[in-house]
Amino acid sequence: MNISIHMILEELREYNPVSEINFNQSFTSYKMLEEDIEAEDILYISDVTKFVSVSKKSKKNTFILIDPLNILLEFDIPKTVNIIRITENISLNTLINRIISLFKKYDDFELKIKSSLFSGINLESILVFVYKYLGVELFLHDSKGNVLFRNSNSYKYYPQSIVVSKTIRDGNKALGSLALMKSKILSEDYQLSVFHELGKMLDKVLDQYFNNKKEAFNDLSKLILEHLTINSLFDNELVNNKLRTLGWTSHDTYKLIIIQSSKFENIESIVDYLNDQYKKDTIIVKQDNKYIVLINLEQIDKKVFIKELRLIQEPKKDLKIIISRNFNDIFEIKDQYQFLLNLISKMNDQLIDMDEDVIKILLHIAKKTNYDVYINTEIKKLKAYDLEHDGDLVETLYAYIAYERSLVNTAEKLNVHRNTVVYRVGKINEIINLDLDSPTVRFHSLISLLLLEQDKLLKYN
């Protein structure tokens, strides 16, 4: 957005509402400037420096000069030229502060300099405006002395033409320097006063910027929540830098977890556990009545981790946990997050792991559908037998298939003797006519069992 004279004057008036903009010709309102004066008739201080050298060739004889500090005496203006001065009784310190505030308010406050060192603050625009408004020529160097930016093309750059320079730092780290160039027109005292006041203001702005950047950089919650879940202004480079400080990369194996409960103490117990056991492997952020957890699986046993979560979660009936699939690009998090957020609102079950519980998810999606027609007739027979004999054959068959027909594991999960499982499996084979040696038959049977009695059976996942 271009900053107009009107905006500048409004900004100055906002700072000191009781002071008046003074003209040496009678304008009824400074707002008339934009309406009555051609843009090319408006001179900044820098335009005057240029104008002085070409005044004899100029066809114009009346100009408006933005002269907030009443420094017109610095210039040798031919008497044949009429200058309409716009002045404001304002200190140099205040003026520079207002210039910087102006760009924060009206301009995209992002860097356009050819260096990522100063990323995040529009030094270019501020320095250009300082030259136009105050006539002071400045150069911005990197830490090696290379010129990154100059706010004027009036003069050629020579190292020996530097009057004074100021180091720009991020803490103890020197990022570059700001250099003041000699002027053929402005007095050195005036230039130095502008330079030093600008330096003070830039120190404040840069300190605030770098502190905010560091605060955001070190705030893992802000990083994960604002950038990775809702697309904030953090750039990929910042995220990668932060990951490196953790010993992570953007292509490690990750899971995203959402933990939700109306009872705060339920969530806190899991978060405390994660902080105790997996502090180096997790980033945890609180959002409303839920926590978002990013876990790096490179150094931990995924199966053990999920098992531990289930053990903590199981007695807490009000607690919901949903765990994403493994993914190997951290910038997929936003998509993972949106999907999990949508799914957790529909969950009946307390814990769903996307890598293991695809069937559960399908059931959630189809829970209002009349899926009785999809249940195998043989499985219905087994259910009828259980109802008539108060049996547990449906549950036994599900555990038997889920644990790959291991009699020992099935007995352990059902908390019965191995011989009991042998008897029940034999009875199942008598009732149903299914080839349980076939993987396809077992898969379809598993689906039928879940559709038939999901609330009872899902605890075996």
Image: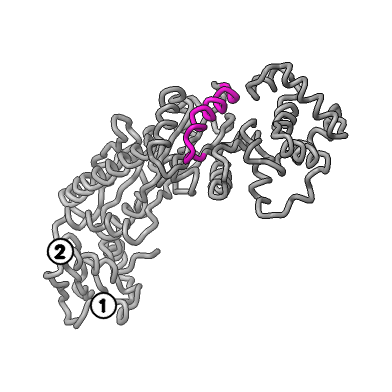
Question: Depth check: 408 or 132 in front?
Answer: 408
Q: Which badge, 2 or 1, comes first in the chain's sequence?
A: 1
Image position of 167 (left or right of 418): left
Note whether 9 is above or below 195 in the view shown.
Answer: below
Vertical side of 74 occupied by 246: above or below: above
Q: Which residue is drawn at 78% across and 42% down?
A: 380
* 56 shown above or below 199: below
**Quarter of the image that includes the N terminus:** bottom left
Q: What residue type is labelled 2?
A: Asn
> Which secondary structure type mostly characterizes the magenta part of the structure?
helix
Q: How many marks?
A: 2
The location of residue 152, given as percent across then percent down, is: 35, 53
Residue type at tag 1:
Lys
Q: What span is colored magenta in the figure?
A: 301-320
- How far from the left and from the top, in percent, is residue 29? 21, 80
Q: In which quarter of the image is residue 208?
A: top left
| Element at label 2 | loop
Q: Name the residue under label 1.
A: 31
Q: Residue at x 85, y 29 (%)?
A: 430
Q: Using a 10 Å C-alpha cutoff, classify the residue at mark 2 as few (fewer than 14 neighbours), some (14 to 19) or many (20 or more).
A: some
Give the residue at mark 2: 70
